[in-house]
Amino acid sequence: MRGKVWKYGDHIDTDVIIPARYLNSTDPKELASHCMTDIDESFAGEVKEGDIMVGGYNFGCGSSREHAPIAIQASGISCVIAASFARIFYRNSINIGFPILECPEASAAINAGDIVSVDTKTGVITDETTGESFQAKPFPEFIDNIIEKGGLLPYLKEKQSM
Amino acid sequence: MGMTMTQKILAAHAGLPEVHAGDLIEAGLDIVLGNDVTTPVAVGVFEKAGFTEVFDKDKIVIALDHYTPCKDIKSAELCVTAREFAKKHGITHLYDVGTVGIEHALLPEQGLVGPGDCIVGADSHTCTYGALGAFSTGVGSTDMAAAMASGLNWFRVPDAIKVELSGKLQPNVSGKDVILHLIGEIGVDGALYQSLEFTGEGVSELSMDDRFTISNMAIEAGGKNGIFPVDEKTMEYIKDRFEREPKVFEADEDAEYARVVKIDLSTLKPTVSMPHLPSNTKTAEEVAGLHIDQVVIGSCTNGRISDLRVAASILKDKKVADGVRCIIIPATQQIYLQCVEEGLVRDFVEAGCAVSAPTCGPCLGGHMGVMADGERAVATTNRNFVGRMGHTGSEVILASPAVAAASAIAGCIAVPEA
């Protein structure tokens, strides 16, 4: 994965990722069109397929709405890197097969607009703009399997049919 | 090494003799919950994966509480999806307009959850049932779909923060002040991936409604769950409600905790959370006089009967200040009826409050009290993020029912008279 960085701060809550006034839809594309709008009006219109989102501590805190990682994923973002994730957002991302990486060092060092490449297998994050590299915690095998199958339900379905 | 109360419940539901913090386990679920926002997404995931049957139609609860009575066509369509799924699978516990209450007040009231249970809900405030000595946590829609299909969810076993409570609350200080104070102390990610386990002699001084409020906001400290020991008050509460056999778990004496936080309840003052984080706490006294436009008393945090009794005792024979809108939302139909029968609705209406049918409504900026740019509310709800109750230029100050009611009369943040 390789893309331009959209950088946000600490405690980015799911209400700003996708405000509740748009939760009357379950359509990923429609959700994506309102993604981040309350803190960044430019995001939904300018994000490009493959771009990378970088947040601070406690990214995705608040409501359990799965609409939040769905909206980010449908907007074209390929991966979220944060110093830490709120637990429900973390589960939801894994469960929908959306790669997220926890790496405080990368979160602190990477700047908005940098070009960053990510190897989700090894957890290596490279800021091509600055030349710096970072090592994120790799997922346990169980979680890797879920992401590889494209989410929890495909994983579960395959397990049940075995 | 001993286990925490949470670890013991998880071990029992995973069929393991013991579990350790960090273990990834699969646990059997006693109740799986969803609402009108999260269930439709879960239904889509469930059906797309090709599942055709639910694991147990009696263990799934669907409560259409967020945007109901429906605020617009799209939200009405979400309810149709949830309703049709419930009908197709013969879901026993579907709560719709007329029977529905705010889910986290409704499930305990209806006796659907109890001590020792392992519960997931596609709503972050599912942690509320920790007040009953259950392991209960919020998950997303895909987890809900997996749970409906298999009766199982995966968990990373959490370590815990022990919160030792001592002393007794002062008049007009309640569970809300306890949890806001704690979040102010440890921060909105202070308990990230962890359990909050409440212990100590102070627990027995807290009413069940206070405990529900405290467990409800464990998520606002980032917690996975917030759990109370089971005592006489718990057993009294579940009597004549909970039909299954309660299972009482206790933390081992040698359980390890990541951290211990001590709170002397007698020292707490009416506390508020200023915009835009629940951890941004002040005493009500410190910010008294700040102008407000709206007051909301209700929600899964503070819409229970004792909350409304406190609010009514302050509003009775008084008037809501000019220019302030005070919206009261009893959390369930049973609580609504109690408010009618006890004369609280009269007190509210005569004071100039609007009383609504049960709904999550304004708490998440859904309906029934959405705010314009520049407006400020005092609310007994649980989140004060940017844009939570409407326009991104509006502000929410979190408070107890006593502070909210006193502020409604004053037209500004006010400290309730003891």
Image (cartoon, coloured by chain):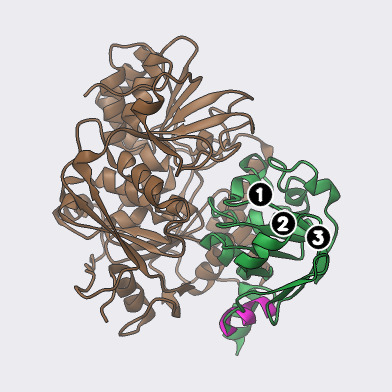
Residue under the point 36% across and 21% down: B414
* Callout 1–callout 2 Cβ contact below 8 Å: yes
Picture coordinates of residue B333 (x, y %)? 37, 37
Establish whether labels 1 and 2 are both on one chain. yes
* Callout 2–callout 3 Cβ contact below 8 Å: no
Q: Residues within 10 Å of mark 2 (few under 14, many from 20)?
A: many
Q: Residue furthest bottom?
A: A162
Disc 2 versus disc 3: nearer the observer: 3
In what element is the residue under mark 1?
helix
In what element is the residue under mark 2?
helix
| Residue B254 vertical placement versus B98 (above, below) | below
Q: Callout 3, which amino acid?
A: Asp
> Which chain is the one coloured brown?
B
* Callout 3–callout 1 Cβ contact below 8 Å: no
| Residue B311 vertical placement versus B91 (above, below) | above
Establish whether labels 2 and 3 are both on one chain. yes
Mark with earlier residue (3, 1):
1
Mark sitting on residue A72:
2
Residue B180: say if magenta.
no
Residue under the point 58% across and 26% down: B371
The residue segment tinted magenta is: A141-148
Q: Nearer the viewer, residue B158 or B188?
A: B188
Q: Quadrant of the C terminus of chain A?
A: bottom right
Q: Residues within 10 Å of mark 3 (few under 14, many from 20)?
A: some
In space, the residues marked 3 and 1 are separated at their CA atoms by 21 Å
Mark sitting on residue A17:
1
Which chain hosts label 2?
A
Q: Nearer the viewer, residue A54 or A143?
A: A54
Picture coordinates of residue B108 (x, y %)? 32, 51
Mark with earlier residue (1, 2):
1
Q: Which residue is mark 3?
A: A114
